[in-house]
Image (cartoon, rainbow, N blue to C red):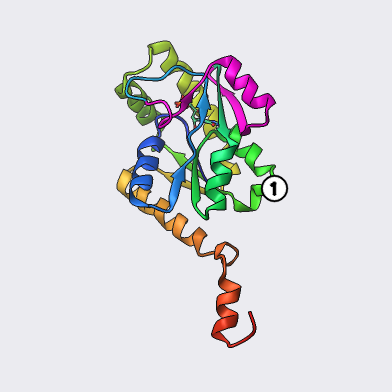
Amino acid sequence: MFVMSSPSGAGKTTLSRRLLADDPQITLSVSATTRPPRAGEVDGRDYFFVSQTRFQAMVHGHELLEYATVFDNRYGTPRAPVEAALAAGRDVLFDIDWQGTQQLQQTDAASDLVRIFILPPNLAELERRLIARNTDHAEVIAARMARACDEIRHWGEYDYVLLNEDVETCLAELKAILLAERLRRRRQLGLADFVRAMLGEAV
Ligand code: 5GP
Protein backbone atom coordinates (compact mmCIF):
# COMPACT_ATOMS: atom_id res chain seq x y z
CA MET A 1 0.00 0.00 0.00
CA PHE A 2 1.87 2.94 -1.41
CA VAL A 3 0.50 6.23 -0.06
CA MET A 4 1.39 9.54 -1.67
CA SER A 5 0.35 12.78 0.00
CA SER A 6 1.19 16.34 -0.86
CA PRO A 7 -0.38 19.76 -0.92
CA SER A 8 -2.37 20.18 -4.14
CA GLY A 9 -0.16 21.68 -6.84
CA ALA A 10 3.00 19.85 -5.74
CA GLY A 11 2.84 17.66 -8.84
CA LYS A 12 1.47 14.50 -7.25
CA THR A 13 -1.09 13.77 -9.98
CA THR A 14 1.56 13.93 -12.72
CA LEU A 15 3.86 11.71 -10.69
CA SER A 16 1.20 9.12 -9.95
CA ARG A 17 0.07 9.00 -13.61
CA ARG A 18 3.65 8.46 -14.74
CA LEU A 19 4.26 5.79 -12.13
CA LEU A 20 1.07 3.93 -13.08
CA ALA A 21 1.95 4.10 -16.78
CA ASP A 22 5.47 2.74 -16.19
CA ASP A 23 4.72 0.05 -13.62
CA PRO A 24 2.20 -2.68 -14.48
CA GLN A 25 2.33 -4.10 -10.94
CA ILE A 26 0.65 -1.14 -9.30
CA THR A 27 -3.03 -0.17 -9.37
CA LEU A 28 -4.49 3.21 -8.42
CA SER A 29 -7.08 3.29 -5.68
CA VAL A 30 -9.83 5.46 -7.17
CA SER A 31 -11.44 7.50 -4.40
CA ALA A 32 -15.05 8.47 -4.01
CA THR A 33 -15.72 12.18 -3.60
CA THR A 34 -18.64 14.56 -3.25
CA ARG A 35 -16.74 17.33 -5.07
CA PRO A 36 -17.93 18.11 -8.61
CA PRO A 37 -15.69 16.91 -11.46
CA ARG A 38 -13.14 19.35 -12.89
CA ALA A 39 -12.80 19.76 -16.64
CA GLY A 40 -11.23 16.65 -18.09
CA GLU A 41 -11.91 14.44 -15.09
CA VAL A 42 -13.62 11.15 -15.82
CA ASP A 43 -15.96 9.35 -13.42
CA GLY A 44 -14.48 6.01 -12.42
CA ARG A 45 -10.98 6.96 -13.58
CA ASP A 46 -10.10 10.09 -11.56
CA TYR A 47 -12.76 9.68 -8.89
CA PHE A 48 -16.12 8.12 -8.33
CA PHE A 49 -18.22 11.29 -8.19
CA VAL A 50 -21.03 10.62 -5.72
CA SER A 51 -23.75 12.57 -3.90
CA GLN A 52 -23.57 13.44 -0.19
CA THR A 53 -26.28 10.85 0.42
CA ARG A 54 -24.40 8.11 -1.37
CA PHE A 55 -21.17 9.04 0.44
CA GLN A 56 -22.93 8.89 3.80
CA ALA A 57 -24.36 5.49 2.89
CA MET A 58 -20.84 4.28 2.05
CA VAL A 59 -19.62 5.48 5.46
CA HIS A 60 -22.47 3.74 7.28
CA GLY A 61 -22.05 0.56 5.25
CA HIS A 62 -18.32 0.40 6.17
CA GLU A 63 -17.56 0.52 2.45
CA LEU A 64 -14.67 2.96 2.94
CA LEU A 65 -11.21 2.10 4.26
CA GLU A 66 -10.75 5.71 5.32
CA TYR A 67 -12.43 9.03 4.64
CA ALA A 68 -11.93 12.70 5.30
CA THR A 69 -13.35 16.13 4.60
CA VAL A 70 -11.14 18.41 2.51
CA PHE A 71 -12.32 21.90 1.43
CA ASP A 72 -15.90 21.11 2.49
CA ASN A 73 -15.91 18.09 0.18
CA ARG A 74 -15.78 14.50 1.32
CA TYR A 75 -13.25 12.01 0.03
CA GLY A 76 -12.90 8.32 0.81
CA THR A 77 -11.20 5.13 -0.31
CA PRO A 78 -13.57 2.34 -1.40
CA ARG A 79 -12.55 -0.79 0.50
CA ALA A 80 -13.52 -3.60 -1.91
CA PRO A 81 -11.27 -2.75 -4.90
CA VAL A 82 -8.26 -2.29 -2.60
CA GLU A 83 -8.82 -5.61 -0.86
CA ALA A 84 -9.29 -7.38 -4.21
CA ALA A 85 -6.09 -5.89 -5.65
CA LEU A 86 -4.05 -6.76 -2.57
CA ALA A 87 -5.46 -10.30 -2.50
CA ALA A 88 -4.39 -10.67 -6.14
CA GLY A 89 -0.84 -9.76 -5.08
CA ARG A 90 -0.90 -6.31 -6.65
CA ASP A 91 0.44 -3.11 -5.13
CA VAL A 92 -1.99 -0.24 -4.64
CA LEU A 93 -1.24 3.47 -4.97
CA PHE A 94 -3.26 5.86 -2.79
CA ASP A 95 -3.48 9.58 -3.52
CA ILE A 96 -4.92 10.65 -0.18
CA ASP A 97 -4.30 13.39 2.36
CA TRP A 98 -2.67 13.24 5.79
CA GLN A 99 -6.00 12.49 7.49
CA GLY A 100 -6.55 9.38 5.38
CA THR A 101 -2.93 8.32 5.84
CA GLN A 102 -3.31 8.54 9.61
CA GLN A 103 -6.45 6.39 9.44
CA LEU A 104 -4.74 3.71 7.33
CA GLN A 105 -1.86 3.77 9.79
CA GLN A 106 -4.31 2.87 12.56
CA THR A 107 -5.64 -0.24 10.78
CA ASP A 108 -4.28 -3.79 10.72
CA ALA A 109 -2.79 -2.96 7.35
CA ALA A 110 -0.28 -0.52 8.87
CA SER A 111 2.68 -2.84 8.27
CA ASP A 112 1.78 -2.88 4.56
CA LEU A 113 1.92 0.91 4.29
CA VAL A 114 4.68 2.89 2.65
CA ARG A 115 4.03 6.59 3.18
CA ILE A 116 5.54 9.17 0.87
CA PHE A 117 5.20 12.92 1.14
CA ILE A 118 5.85 15.12 -1.89
CA LEU A 119 7.01 18.67 -1.16
CA PRO A 120 6.90 21.49 -3.72
CA PRO A 121 10.23 23.32 -4.15
CA ASN A 122 8.73 26.41 -2.45
CA LEU A 123 5.37 28.06 -1.81
CA ALA A 124 5.67 30.57 -4.69
CA GLU A 125 6.06 27.68 -7.11
CA LEU A 126 3.10 25.94 -5.53
CA GLU A 127 0.93 29.04 -6.03
CA ARG A 128 2.17 29.40 -9.60
CA ARG A 129 1.17 25.79 -10.33
CA LEU A 130 -2.26 26.26 -8.77
CA ILE A 131 -2.86 29.40 -10.86
CA ALA A 132 -1.47 27.78 -14.04
CA ARG A 133 -3.93 24.93 -13.58
CA ASN A 134 -6.58 27.63 -13.91
CA THR A 135 -9.43 25.41 -12.87
CA ASP A 136 -10.13 27.22 -9.61
CA HIS A 137 -11.25 30.75 -8.70
CA ALA A 138 -8.94 33.17 -6.83
CA GLU A 139 -10.56 32.60 -3.46
CA VAL A 140 -10.35 28.85 -3.96
CA ILE A 141 -6.65 29.22 -4.75
CA ALA A 142 -6.13 31.26 -1.56
CA ALA A 143 -7.94 28.58 0.43
CA ARG A 144 -5.83 25.88 -1.24
CA MET A 145 -2.64 27.75 -0.31
CA ALA A 146 -3.73 27.88 3.34
CA ARG A 147 -4.67 24.23 3.20
CA ALA A 148 -1.33 23.42 1.51
CA CYS A 149 0.52 24.85 4.51
CA ASP A 150 -1.62 22.71 6.84
CA GLU A 151 -0.84 19.62 4.76
CA ILE A 152 2.91 20.38 4.69
CA ARG A 153 2.96 20.54 8.50
CA HIS A 154 2.31 16.76 8.48
CA TRP A 155 5.48 15.90 6.55
CA GLY A 156 6.99 14.30 9.67
CA GLU A 157 4.36 11.53 9.66
CA TYR A 158 5.69 9.99 6.43
CA ASP A 159 8.38 7.37 5.78
CA TYR A 160 9.85 9.23 2.81
CA VAL A 161 9.83 12.90 1.85
CA LEU A 162 10.62 13.90 -1.73
CA LEU A 163 11.23 17.40 -3.03
CA ASN A 164 9.57 17.73 -6.43
CA GLU A 165 11.89 20.22 -8.11
CA ASP A 166 12.17 18.12 -11.23
CA VAL A 167 9.54 15.55 -12.26
CA GLU A 168 12.02 13.10 -13.80
CA THR A 169 14.23 13.08 -10.70
CA CYS A 170 11.26 12.74 -8.39
CA LEU A 171 9.81 9.91 -10.49
CA ALA A 172 13.13 8.06 -10.39
CA GLU A 173 13.18 8.47 -6.60
CA LEU A 174 9.62 7.13 -6.33
CA LYS A 175 10.53 4.08 -8.41
CA ALA A 176 13.58 3.47 -6.27
CA ILE A 177 11.45 3.53 -3.11
CA LEU A 178 8.90 1.18 -4.65
CA LEU A 179 11.59 -1.26 -5.72
CA ALA A 180 13.35 -1.25 -2.36
CA GLU A 181 10.09 -1.69 -0.45
CA ARG A 182 9.09 -4.60 -2.70
CA LEU A 183 12.39 -6.29 -1.92
CA ARG A 184 11.82 -6.22 1.82
CA ARG A 185 12.00 -9.77 3.07
CA ARG A 186 8.49 -9.81 4.53
CA ARG A 187 7.00 -8.61 1.23
CA GLN A 188 8.58 -11.34 -0.87
CA LEU A 189 5.83 -13.92 -0.75
CA GLY A 190 7.00 -17.50 -1.16
CA LEU A 191 10.60 -16.64 -0.39
CA ALA A 192 10.89 -18.98 2.61
CA ASP A 193 9.67 -21.95 0.52
CA PHE A 194 11.99 -20.97 -2.30
CA VAL A 195 15.04 -20.93 -0.04
CA ARG A 196 14.06 -24.21 1.64
CA ALA A 197 13.71 -25.87 -1.76
CA MET A 198 17.08 -24.40 -2.80
CA LEU A 199 18.67 -25.99 0.25
CA GLY A 200 16.92 -29.29 -0.40
CA GLU A 201 14.90 -29.01 2.79
CA ALA A 202 11.28 -30.10 3.06
CA VAL A 203 8.85 -27.36 2.02
P1 5GP B 1 -8.54 17.25 -5.25
O1 5GP B 1 -9.89 17.82 -4.95
O2 5GP B 1 -7.54 18.33 -5.58
O3 5GP B 1 -8.58 16.15 -6.27
O4 5GP B 1 -8.02 16.56 -3.90
C1 5GP B 1 -7.93 17.31 -2.72
C2 5GP B 1 -7.21 16.50 -1.67
O5 5GP B 1 -7.98 15.35 -1.29
C3 5GP B 1 -5.85 15.95 -2.11
O6 5GP B 1 -4.91 16.23 -1.09
C4 5GP B 1 -6.07 14.46 -2.23
O7 5GP B 1 -4.91 13.74 -1.92
C5 5GP B 1 -7.13 14.24 -1.17
N1 5GP B 1 -7.89 13.00 -1.40
C6 5GP B 1 -8.31 12.50 -2.59
N2 5GP B 1 -8.93 11.33 -2.41
C7 5GP B 1 -8.90 11.07 -1.08
C8 5GP B 1 -9.39 9.99 -0.27
O8 5GP B 1 -9.97 9.01 -0.72
N3 5GP B 1 -9.16 10.09 1.06
C9 5GP B 1 -8.51 11.15 1.62
N4 5GP B 1 -8.32 11.13 2.94
N5 5GP B 1 -8.05 12.18 0.90
C10 5GP B 1 -8.25 12.15 -0.44
In the rendered view, tell whether residue 152 sits above or below residue 112. above
17 lies left or right of 68:
left
The boundaries of the magenta stretch are 42-71
Indicate the position of residue 114 as horizontal and vertical percent values. Answer: 55, 50
Question: Is ligand 1 closer than 8 angstroms to the Cβ of mark 1?
Answer: no
- Viewer can see residue 164: no
Q: Is residue 201 above or below residue 89?
A: below
- x and y percentages locating residue 170 in the rendered image: 37, 48
Q: For residue 49: magenta?
A: yes
Question: Which residue is painted at 65% across and 48% down in the image?
Answer: 109
Image quarter where the C terminus lies is bottom right
- Horizontal side, residue 195 vs residue 43: left or right: right
Residue 47 in view? yes
Identify residue for label 1: 108
Farthest residue, direction bottom: 200
Q: Position of residue 59 (x, y in %)?
A: 65, 26
**Where is residue 133 drawn, in percent x and y?**
32, 23
| Amino acid type, residue under disc 1 in the picture | Asp
Above or below, comparing residue 81 to residue 134 in the picture? below
Q: Residue at x 32, y 24 (%)?
A: 40
Q: Nearer the viewer, residue 38 or 121?
A: 38
